[in-house]
Image: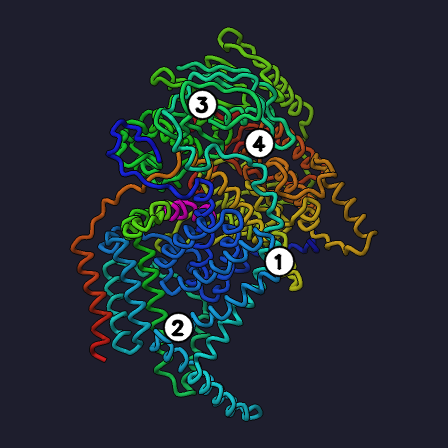
Amino acid sequence: MTQRHAQPSPDPADQRPRRPHRAGVHEVLLRRLPHDSPLHRLGVGTKLVTLLVLTIATGLNTGWEQLAGVAVVVGAALVAARVPLRALPRLPHWFGLTILISFGFAAAGGGAERFIRLIAFGLLFALLSLVIAWTTDLSALAPALARIGAPLRRLRMPVDDWAVTAALAVRCLPLVIDEVRTVAAAHRQRTTTRDPAMLLSRLVDMITASMAAALRRSSDLGEVIAMRGGAATPAPTTMRPGLADVAALTLVLAASVLPAVLS
Amino acid sequence: MRAAPTGGAGSNPRRLAILAPAEMAAAATMSALCIGLAVLGSLVPFLGSLQLLTVVPFALLAHRHGLRALIASLIAVAVIAGLVAGVGIVTSLVALAILGGIIGELKRRQLGILALLACAAVLVPAAAAGIDLLLYVFASARELMLQNVRSSLRGLGVVLHHLGPAGHAAAPLNALGRLIVQDWAIFAGVAAGAATLAALLSSWVIIGEVLERLAWVGADQPFAPTTARKERVVESDPAPIPVELRQVHFRYGTHEALRGIDLSLRAGQFVAIVGDNGSGKSTLARILAGAQPTDGEVQRPGSVGLGRHGGVALIGQRPDAQVLGLCVRDDVTWGLPAGHTVDVENLLATVGLAGMGDRDTATLSGGELQRLAVAAALAREPRLLISDESTAMVDPDGRAQLIRLFAELPQRWPMTVVHITHNAGELTSADRVVQLAHGRVVAEYEPAAQPNVSQTAASQLSEQQQTSGLHKPSPPVHATAAGRVELRNVTHRYANRTVWEHQALDELTLNAQPGEGVMVVGQNGSGKSTLAWIVAGLLRPTAGACLLDGQPTEMLRGRVGIAFQHARLQLQRPTVGADIADAAGWPRADPENAEARRELDARVAEVLRAVGLEPSLADRSIDQLSGGQQRRVAIAGLLARQPSVLVLDEPLAGLDAPSQAGLIQLLMEMRARRSMTLIAVTHDPHGMRELCPRMIRLAQGRIIEDTDDPSHAPPLNARAA
């Protein structure tokens, strides 16, 4: 804006040779690994139970034995998913730096061992979430949800509607993310200067624009659902728990119970 | 409850649908927003605070649709986010949903800050108790975390001690650490309570403002075809055809959309309804689909049965908005009662999508999506199929295929097809044409018997010809002018160096002179949107450079204007005037200073006039405008910045012919008068040739065609072959 006729620099394209860098975490979130693997075929319910059991077990026992248990499960998942190294996103340098400095303080205070355990748990669980996201077809979630929630139907809870809502949410996710990305881009295009006093007002602007787009989408979607005569029961899942699910759950239970027995 | 449509009554598991379509749609959309925020917040380092924003969608849901929708949304968000971002996230999501739910409900009942404080009096102790309970149960995790805080504090003390001057801080830090571990219940309780109170108060302010600004959104949609399940319970067997309309009126508030329509539809016809924007044709579609007229009579042998077997099926305008399934097959069967089997392959073959059952719906083009919508409609064997401008946002090839399909259907099935359009070229294959203007039927004829195009269509055509004849700008070449765009070997890859690496642009080189009009054409996924974002400086190319007058565009954000396809996303301030001022970078007027305000108003009025809008619109809320008006306001804001380059993403999509012609004329004037470089990105070159004489065709990130005068280019179908 300010310098409409800026001095032409000799050749900026050649001036700043760049090494194409690896994509950051935000670019690879919620994406499925394109190949097939045993973990891709594992039931969604099994994955949910795994997460739940491991999280509770870790909450109750944070010893090294439990850490080993979680590590075994995550390691098995990484192998079963055949995760290529190129799936791993790049973490910003300052992320490592921050952890290093925090470790320095903790170590100076005599808590090096504890700090390592805490960070290890955090990284293992983040990795587990990533592996599950990489291998789970979210469209399988709705039937699984309908089946897991079946007992609630007796209490007259609209389990099927919840399942359909979840499926529609999965369907809307890429569209909504795209819209928010556009709002942010339009915002960046306008705000060439940063004014901290405007921060809250800018935030409200962006939220409002995103919500307005989401509301429009929602009213369109509501009409489309009505045009199809309303939602029906989600299609019954063809996936039945198999040997792999039994094996996985056995491993998870062992990894959760054994450490508690051992310690 | 739904009647069993396949005759196997009683064999279908019956169910209670508790959520109305609108509630379910809102819950799903808001869930998607929340999931995005939660996952981004939990997995990207240091974006954790994004999670807090989920309180806004939750509050909006509670505000507009109440508790049922909120619960459905919370369950969807908790399960999906819990699965892909860890179970730990669920606790905070539940807390945020409760917070948002309370604020939304209070706002709905129009209660003030006192009611909020009363809620806080309950919520704050509850949050404290909840945290303490969690920490009590998960004692081991608590010990690990708090001991870690303690040793870090001690470590901080040690470091400070060694540094010297602040050495005396070590002892109190130690004491604090010890206290936190010993009296964890008090510390954690107070922290949780304080956080809850702070979140409640700040969300109250932010949500209050957001809700106020959003008051207009959705206010113009007074009816969805069916809203409650009760209607379905009492419905008799569907038999929507033959239908007879007598003196039907429809009013939205004070606006009269239909003023006495007489119309009868028989079985087995292909009827086209044609008219301009505002002629009432979409409202007529809604009446045929079962909406109650304000006045007048609609006679059918049975019920409408929207979306039911043997009833009415409706196909709308926006291709991407109509897909409900994640893969093609799921979308065809979406909403069909359990036990109802259809031959999906056969249906897909009928609409020309044979063998695509397993395709991801996100990979289909606009035309394919609309034909998929037809397949989903056919799965219900409707007696009446209504296409409400379903061809408006589809490229010419796709349009021709759809029209051919509509004409065929009444011959193959006992069904009536009603196609609503503003495009006169689509009428020839219809059995009957009904022309609407100002809410009345002004002509009814058989196109075979009366092949002349209708009056409105003729006037539209001549208008277009006029604009193209009158405003043929000589290509303005200014050697010294700003606005030279240069792309040098630009390559862009998304998810670079990961498994998902996707190359959008491949060594692309392109020059646009100042004042040149360039149209970039290509299919979905050809890289044209990536190109637009790079030229606008919003994306940094992976390799190569995009230069504006010799400088990389990523350093010059704001000097290249970009108009996104969905204009609403670009308009960020509450009113038209405020948004234009904001986009232009003019300082916000001090409300005290009448002089400055008047000056600002005058500048806004000038810009509004330049894009052909009434200056009186300045005080309107953004969400009161039509899509075409929003696009003009977005362009007005961009022009106010005096950009040397303007990038337009699908500038004509979703506009009717007169609006398209108006916009083209406006942009031609801008280009000629300001010698602005124009880069328009579109999948449909139709109607843009005068504006952008140079056409560049992209495929797989490469330029496959670069013609200066597109009239010499081979016709579309030859090119596709």
**Chain letter belonging to callout 1:** B
Q: CA distance from mark 4 to mark 3?
A: 19 Å
Residue shown at 39% from the left, 57% from the top: B78
Amino acid type at mark 3: Ala
Q: CA distance from mark 4 to mark 2?
A: 57 Å
- The residue where tag 3 is placed is B400
Question: What x and y, as percent, mark residue B210?
Answer: 59, 52
Question: What x and y, as percent, mark residue A84?
Answer: 29, 59
Q: Secondary structure at mark 2?
A: helix
Q: Nearer the viewer, mark 2 or mark 1?
A: 1
Task: Confirm whether residue B356 shows in the render.
Answer: yes
Q: Secondary structure at mark 3?
A: helix
Q: Which residue is at the front of the view, B115 or B98? A: B115
Give the mark, 1 or 3, whose residue is nearer the N terminus.
Answer: 1
Residue B133 — which label? 2
Residue B441 — which label? none
- The residue where tag 4 is placed is B655
Give the mark, 4 or 3, whose residue is nearer the N terminus.
Answer: 3
